[in-house]
Image (cartoon, grey):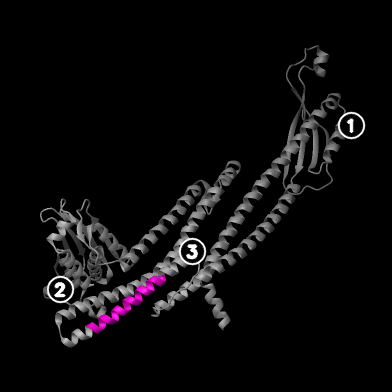
């Protein structure tokens, strides 16, 4: 039972699937090359046989001129008998210009399969007297005149035997090549996935809560660098876990002292620390689980492009000689371009996946307290949508309209992303049966000199009584679904510390509009002037306390 369980586990493993992909690809390429080689050789054998028959018929026609003039049938019969002794000739006949059969010779071997017929005219050379011209006293003709015809019938069984032998040899060599390369790939994959399994075991240990676990992989390759990155992430998570424990002690102390304001600040920090701990652990595992297969996909896309570039000239030559043919049910003319485009799409989409994962990692490990003097709000919106891409359900339609030439603001991108993620998630959760539209719009209000971000949903709306308490800490209509009641409270705090406003407009049954208004940075204001207008350090400390 244990042995069957290990076999079942191996058959479901990534290394086995990767081995199957490599083996199948090698088998297909070997079969393709063998097929092209056999087709080319088949055409060459048949062409050689036709040329050989044409040459024999031409020689026989030239040698038969004088016996044909002299009507020497014995000589013609002897020539035909000599010709039919050739292994590929099964029948030879010589006729006069009037179509009269003068002689015929057949091979003793039986006709098997397809034959090739060759007919060559027997002509009299120019400037020679024909018997009729000599009798009638006519001058010699300057043109060749047909005085008879030679007919050869060739047997193609020899060609077929050669092709059968060639096919058997090609299959044997191709099978041997496939077995050798498959064994080599197995050994390579076994060595590569050994480090992969060690890395995965370390990730599982860290994921189970043993944050002191470290993955030790020697070398300086991609896996070793990934192990170092995971070790650094585990150390960071361990430090955040210690901070989390410290914050819990502070929370208990604050609750005992019943200092409400202190309790709110510690709670906000605790929630944010828990969020970053869980998110960092998730992203460290997810980045590895996605990036490794994604790198293999991108490598396979490049390999397919290179292999196809080498195969296309051979297939073009086959198409020129044999005419158009089909690959995978598609005409070669269409498949020639489609395969190159699809290989390019594989690489392009693989790079898109890598960018999305990188965006998630940056969100999870970024420094939220760092203010940027030239923050583009559209960048924060794009990053927030990348983080929420996996939360978008099929029945939710996301519509975005990002304004162009928006002025920059002074603020923290991670903090603005957190506000937008809270608002967009609230909009999605407000849709009945997870079905409807969510719109995200950015624009610039020149009158108030503010950058505006609007999140609109077509959900159930909010009642007047609920609207009055939305910004109270720990108030939530989704406590039974895991809501904390701090999302809008923290969002309003972050927007306020950026000098902006967070407004909500809603009616029951009409959906909800959340509007974030952030002051634009003055075009002629330097960073020092902006900090002078609003205490930069105070803003950074306040935001850090909220996290």
Disc number placed over residue 221 in the picture, else none:
3
Q: Which residue is mark 2?
A: 471
Q: Disc 2 or 1, which lies upstream in sequence?
A: 1
Q: CA distance from mark 2 to mark 3?
A: 50 Å
* Horizontal side, residue 47 vs residue 293: left or right: right
Disc 1, SS: helix
Disc 3, SS: loop
The residue depicted at 71 percent of the width and 53 percent of the height is 164
Which of the two residues, 78 or 340, is positioned nearer the viewer here?
A: 340
Which of the two residues, 86 or 297, is positioned nearer the viewer here?
A: 297
Mark nearer the viewer, 2 or 1:
2
Q: Disc 1 or 3, which lies upstream in sequence?
A: 1
Secondary structure mostly seen in magenta is helix
Disc 2, SS: loop
x, y percentage for residue 479? 23, 80
Mark nearer the viewer, 2 or 3:
3
x, y percentage for residue 172? 69, 58
Answer with the quarter of the image where residue 291 lies: bottom left
x, y percentage for residue 474? 19, 79
Check disc 2: other Cα within 10 Å, few if <14, some if 14-19, many if 20+: some
Disc number placed over residue 74 in the picture, else none:
1
* Boundaries of the magenta span: 230-250
311 vs 211: above or below: above
Q: CA distance from mark 1 to mark 3?
A: 85 Å
Answer whether residue 214 is visible to the viewer in this image.
Answer: yes
């Amino acid at each position: 039972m244990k042995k069957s369980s290990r076999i079942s586990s191996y058959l479901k493993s990534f290394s086995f699937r990767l081995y199957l992909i490599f083996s199948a690809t090698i088998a297909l390429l070997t079969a393709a090359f063998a097929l092209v080689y056999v087709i080319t050789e088949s055409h060459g054998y048949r062409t050689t046989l036709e040329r050989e028959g044409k040459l024999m018929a031409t020689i026989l026609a030239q040698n038969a001129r004088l016996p044909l003039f002299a009507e020497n049938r014995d000589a013609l019969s002897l020539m035909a008998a000599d010709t039919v002794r050739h292994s590929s000739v099964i029948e030879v006949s010589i006729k006069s210009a009037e179509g009269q059969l003068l002689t015929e010779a057949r091979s003793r071997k039986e006709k098997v399969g397809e034959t090739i017929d060759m007919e060559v005219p027997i002509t009299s050379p120019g400037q020679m007297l024909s018997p009729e011209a000599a009798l009638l006293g006519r001058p010699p003709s300057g043109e060749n005149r047909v005085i008879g015809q030679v007919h050869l019938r060739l047997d193609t069984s020899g060609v077929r035997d050669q092709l059968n032998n060639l096919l058997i040899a090609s299959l044997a060599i191709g099978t041997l090549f496939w077995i050798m390369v498959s064994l080599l790939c197995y050994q390579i994959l076994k060595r590569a996935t050994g480090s992969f399994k060690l890395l995965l075991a370390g990730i599982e240990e860290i994921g189970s809560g043993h944050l002191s676990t470290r993955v030790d992989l020697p070398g300086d390759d991609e896996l070793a660098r990934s192990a170092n990155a995971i070790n650094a992430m585990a150390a960071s998570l361990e430090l955040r876990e210690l901070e989390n424990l410290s914050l819990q002690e502070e929370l208990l102390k604050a609750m005992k002292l019943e200092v409400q304001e202190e309790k709110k600040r510690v709670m906000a920090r605790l929630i944010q620390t828990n969020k970053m701990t869980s998110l960092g652990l998730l992203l460290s595992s997810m980045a590895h689980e996605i990036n490794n297969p994604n790198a293999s996909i991108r490598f396979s896309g490049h390999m397919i492009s290179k292999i196809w570039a080498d195969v296309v000239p051979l297939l073009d030559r086959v198409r020129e000689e044999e005419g158009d043919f089909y690959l995978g049910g598609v005409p070669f003319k269409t498949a020639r371009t489609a395969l190159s485009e699809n290989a390019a799409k594989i690489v392009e989409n693989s790079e898109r996946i890598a960018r999305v994962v990188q965006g998630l990692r940056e969100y999870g490990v970024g420094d939220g307290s760092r203010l940027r003097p030239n923050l583009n709000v559209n960048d924060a919106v794009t990053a927030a949508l990348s983080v929420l891409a996996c939360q978008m359900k099929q029945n939710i339609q996301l519509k975005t309209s990002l304004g162009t030439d928006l002025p920059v603001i002074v603020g923290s991108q991670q903090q603005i992303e957190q506000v937008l993620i809270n608002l967009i998630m609230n909009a999605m959760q407000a849709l009945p049966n997870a079905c409807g539209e969510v719109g995200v719009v950015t624009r610039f209000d020149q009158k108030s000199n503010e950058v505006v971000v609007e999140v609109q949903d077509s959900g159930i709306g909010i009642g007047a009584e609920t609207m009055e308490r939305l910004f109270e800490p720990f108030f939530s209509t989704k406590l039974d679904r895991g809501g904390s009641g701090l999302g809008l409270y923290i969002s309003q705090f972050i927007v306020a510390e950026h000098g902006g406003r967070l407004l909500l407009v809603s009616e029951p049954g009409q959906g909800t509009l959340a509007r974030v208004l952030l002051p634009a940075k003055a075009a002629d204001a330097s960073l020092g002037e902006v900090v002078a207008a609003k205490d930069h350090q105070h803003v950074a400390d306040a935001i850090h306390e909220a996290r």
